[in-house]
Image (cartoon, grey):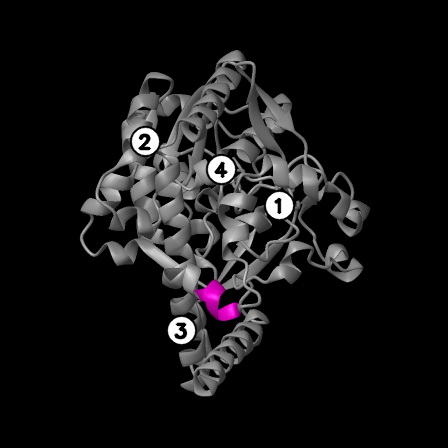
């Protein structure tokens, strides 16, 4: 009996020690401290991308570098907070405008390797890139509506990953992407058959320091608080909590520990993060089978199409898969977007990516996951060009 008690105690101490050790470097291991994380004044001041309407947005004139497996890449943003198009660096006017997430902004490649740039080369015209990392279709749509009064584009392309069905349901990304504590955002709901937007609870920088009174509201409107975040919390008894989600927690701890013990912490981090991504993608796939989730996404796509039509612009929706989307057999997300083709032109690149030889080469890899490579971005641009028959309207875009 004493040996059994000692064994249980030793297991508990080891589980607690491993969790606390790795949590400092890997925020996707969450404990009860993450229920109310501390947001310091210094962290808030350093948050350059804060936007009271959209949650976050690129800043005019910003730039930076990112590390990939092939070395450093750089990006730059023009005076209208669009990614720089080197072929039309001094042109404000653009007959084509692209909105969306980081797969539209095109992280991990150079300014002249993005798919909006390649589309610009194909059409011989400026293509403005309004993509912003981690946006859902909801935030990208709100940015389009904000830019609309000064937008002269005749074609508006919305480019998002299939995971957008999850992103549009978040009000605080921390509940889906643990550790992303500054990412408060607006969230649409359907009430009495129409879309209603719940503004972000953070309306000015000072609000970050006093976010806790908003937690009951956030937990009520963000489904991932109960569905995901609470389930993944680790605490006493640690060993029991680890075993409630063994396919997630145990591989993460294994890869992080192995990385430290073998002197390859970056490799351990990457492998552990792959487990997180796999888990998130499994949830995303389930959302495409749920009526409430698809109904909200369908309503947002409808609003995008209607917004463009009212402004005399042609809309197009582009779905760009992540690697996990290619690993699954054709399923619910592809079936869903086929039904949207009656609302607006839809270019779902999942099948095209899946059919490519050496699909691993379609992605560049960085610390926070893969993004389309230059090769993939050329494929995306060509697919848009051919699907929308832009060659037939080339004079319109020159």
> Which numbered disc flags the more N-terminal residue, 3 or 2?
3
Label 4 or label 3, whichever lies nearer to me, is 3
Q: Which mark identifies residue 58?
A: 1
Q: Which residue is mark 2?
A: 347
> Which of 50/311 is in front?
50
Which quadrant would the N terminus be assigned to in this image? Answer: bottom left
Q: Is residue 254 left or right of residue 331?
A: right
Q: Which residues are magenta?
A: 238-242
Residue 179 higher or lower than 131, as above or below: below
Residue at the image point whose x is 31% and y is 22% from the top: 339
Q: Position of residue 193 (x, y in %)?
A: 52, 14
The relative height of residue 378 versus residue 66 in the rendered view (above or below) is above
Residue 258, position in %: x, y? Answer: 40, 80
| Sequence-wise first label, 1 or 4 | 1
Q: Secondary structure at mark 1?
A: loop
Q: Is residue 28 magenta?
A: no
Q: Quadrant of residue 382?
A: top left
Label 3 sits on a secondary structure element that is helix
Distance between the alpha carbons at the discs numbered 1 and 4: 12 Å
Quadrant housing residue 272: bottom left
Disc 4 secondary structure class: strand
Q: Is residue 138 above or below residue 268?
A: above
The residue carrying pointer 2 sits among few (fewer than 14), some (14 to 19) or many (20 or more) residues within 10 Å by Cα, namely many
Q: Residue at x 44, y 78 (%)?
A: 257
Residue 370 visible in the displayed image:
no
Name the residue tied to disc 3: 255
Q: Which residue is identified by label 4?
A: 100
User: Marks 4/2: CA distance?
Assistant: 14 Å
Q: Residues within 10 Å of mark 4 (few under 14, many from 20)?
A: many
Taking 27 as reference, is 223 above or below it?
above
Residue 114, x across and y down, in percent? 42, 47
> In the drawing, does residue 344 fall left or right of residue 81?
left
């Amino acid at each position: 009996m004493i040996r059994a008690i000692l064994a249980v105690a030793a297991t508990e101490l080891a589980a607690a020690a491993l969790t606390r050790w790795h949590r400092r470097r890997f925020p996707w291991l969450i404990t009860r401290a993450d229920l109310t994380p501390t947001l310091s004044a210094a962290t808030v001041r350093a948050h350059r991308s804060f936007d009271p309407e959209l949650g976050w947005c690129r800043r005019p004139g910003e730039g930076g570098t990112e590390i990939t497996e092939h070395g450093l890449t750089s990006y730059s943003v023009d005076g209208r907070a669009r990614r720089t198009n080197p072929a039309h660096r001094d042109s404000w006017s653009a007959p084509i405008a692209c909105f969306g997430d980081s797969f539209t902004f095109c992280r991990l490649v150079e300014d002249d390797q993005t798919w909006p740039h390649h589309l610009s080369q194909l059409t011989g015209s400026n293509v403005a890139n309004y993509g912003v990392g981690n946006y859902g279709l909801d935030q990208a749509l709100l940015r389009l509506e904000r830019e609309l009064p000064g937008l002269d584009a005749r074609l508006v392309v919305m480019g998002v990953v299939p995971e957008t069905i999850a992103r549009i349901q978040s009000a605080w990304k921390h509940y889906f992407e643990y550790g992303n504590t500054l990412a408060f955002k607006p969230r649409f709901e359907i009430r009495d058959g129409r879309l209603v937007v719940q503004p972000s609870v953070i309306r000015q920088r000072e609000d970050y320091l006093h976010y806790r009174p908003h937690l009951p509201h956030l937990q009520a409107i963000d489904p991932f608080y109960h569905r995901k975040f609470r389930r993944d919390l680790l605490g006493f008894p640690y060993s029991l909590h680890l075993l409630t989600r063994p396919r997630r927690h145990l591989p993460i701890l294994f890869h992080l520990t192995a990385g430290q013990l073998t002197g390859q912490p970056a490799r351990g981090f990457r492998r552990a993060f792959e487990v997180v991504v796999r888990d998130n993608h499994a949830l995303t796939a389930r959302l495409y089978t749920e009526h409430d989730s698809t109904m909200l996404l369908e309503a947002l796509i409808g609003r995008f199409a209607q917004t463009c039509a009212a402004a005399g612009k042609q809309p197009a929706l582009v779905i760009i898969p992540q690697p996990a989307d290619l690993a699954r057999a054709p399923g619910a997300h592809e079936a869903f977007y086929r039904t949207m083709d009656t609302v607006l032109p839809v270019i779902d690149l999942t099948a095209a990516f899946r059919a490519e030889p050496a699909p691993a080469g379609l992605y560049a890899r960085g610390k926070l996951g893969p993004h389309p490579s230059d090769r993939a971005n050329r494929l995306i641009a060509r697919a848009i060009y051919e699907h929308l028959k832009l060659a037939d309207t080339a004079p319109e875009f020159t």
